[in-house]
Structures are given as C-alpha cells and as structure tokens.
Amino acid sequence: MDRYKALLRNNRAWVQGKLRMDDQYFKRQVAGQHPPFLWIGCADSRVGPEEITGAKAGDLFVHRNIANIVTHSDLNLMSVLEYGVLTLRVDHIVVCGHTACGGVQAALGHRKLGIIDKWIRTIKDIYHDHREELEGIEDENERWNRLVEVNVREQVMNLAKTSFVQRRWHDGDFPVLHGWVYHVEDGRLEDVTRHAKDDPLDPIYRYEFDDE
C-alpha cells in the first residue's frame, strides 16, 4: 500500500475512535481555540510537539521551522507570534530545540547547501558570539548539542525583544517564555531557560507603550 494511503486510513480510524469516546468531540473543535501555549519548534520529523508532550488538540498553537529560529525578519513567525500573543493570548511560549539537530549541525560546517545557508546564518552568528566556549569543547557531538542549547537560549531572548511580547507584559504578567531541549536519544525534555516580564533585558530593546 502507498504510504500516503496508510495516513488516510489512519485518519479514518482516529476519527472513529474519537467519536466512540465522545460523539460531540468535533463539534466542540469547531467552536474555536483557546490554547495556553505557543510552541516554536524545529521542523524535524522526530519532534512532533503533541507527540513528545502528550498535549491534546487545542493545547498548542504551533509554529515550526528549521532549527527553531526566532528572527524579526520572518513574517510567517512574526504573524504567528502576534496572533498567538495578542489575539489568542497564550500564557506561555516555548522555544524547543533538540539534540542531533541537522540545521545546527549544518551551521557548524562549511558545505554550501542552498537557500538554507541564508536561514542558518543566524546560528553561525550565535556560534561566532560564543566561539570561545564552543571551541573549548573537544568532543564534536558535545559541541553540537551545546550549540543546540545556546541557540534555544538566544531565540528565547529574541522573543523577549519583540513588541508583541512586551505589549502583553505592559498589560500584565504573561506570557512567560521558556526554552527547552528535547533529547532525541532518550525522549527527555530539558528545561534550559526561562524569561518573564521582570527579567533583565538590554534597554535598547525595550519599547514604550501609551496607556490606552
């Protein structure tokens, strides 16, 4: 059987299973979404967010890209962020990287790969800023995975620098920003950083808002 047909067959079985447990399940889904989390993760096929967290439909508002990068020039991500933070009003944003990340590995190398070279340039810049620490790690796999963690930390800070997040902070205490690393080798999620409203942020990145 063609693999795509197996996916369609699995979907039919999933629908029937949901309806057997709750015949109103899909009617409630149509009513709208109120997720407490925005998840920014890697596009890697091994790290599906619902799969690794056990989340249910409606729990996670999800954006994924290669190497879970947060950059102000990515209009796709910025649109997701604005909608998630200001319209859906999520309380938590998780940036989740993972060990054995191919995007991070590519950034460590010098091979020309195509358009992705432009995308992972961000990670090369992070490597440049942390060169002394990273090049002090002799084991290549350890250096690779350390850059995964450093990248997550930097992307969390990039979220803190956005006007959308700061707009919500102006109004209250949320969202709280989290940086996690998923360990592909054992399935474990590691909490590596957290940034909340009153945590330090370089003043050059702070916005001022008029009270409405």
Image (spheres, rainbow, N blue to C red):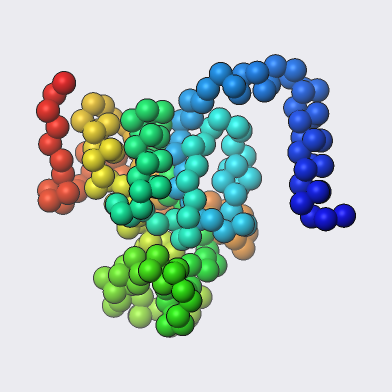
Location of the C terminus by quadrant is top left
Q: Is residue 181 visible from the viewing direction of this image?
A: no
Instruction: Determine whether, in the image, residue 17 is placed left or right of residue 120.
Output: right
What x and y, as percent, mark residue 206?
16, 44
What x and y, as percent, mark residue 25?
68, 21
Q: Is residue 18 above or below residue 143?
A: above
Query: In the depicted view, which residue is nearer to us: 185 or 102?
Result: 102
Q: Is residue 117 above or below residue 57?
A: below
Residue 84, image quadrant: top left
What x and y, as percent, mark residue 15?
76, 30
Query: In the depicted view, which residue is nearer to us: 190 or 109?
Result: 109
Instruction: Determine whether, in the image, residue 57 is placed left or right of residue 201.
Output: right
Q: Is residue 176 above or below residue 4?
A: above
Query: In the depicted view, which residue is nearer to us: 18 or 4?
Result: 4
Residue 137, image quadrant: bottom left
Q: Is residue 85 visible from the viewing direction of this image?
A: yes
Query: In the depicted view, which residue is nearer to us: 145 or 25?
Result: 25
User: Residue at position x 29%, y 74% from top?
Assistant: 128
Instruction: Determine whether, in the image, residue 135 is placed left or right of residue 32.
Output: left
Given the current orientation, which residue lies at the most extreme right position? 1
User: Residue at position x 70%, y 16% from top?
Assistant: 24
What x and y, as percent, mark residue 37?
46, 35
Q: Is residue 126 above or below residue 44?
A: below
How many numbered discs, if any? 0
User: Residue at position x 35%, y 45% from top?
Assistant: 78
User: Residue at position x 44%, y 56% from top?
Assistant: 68
Location of the N terminus by quadrant is bottom right
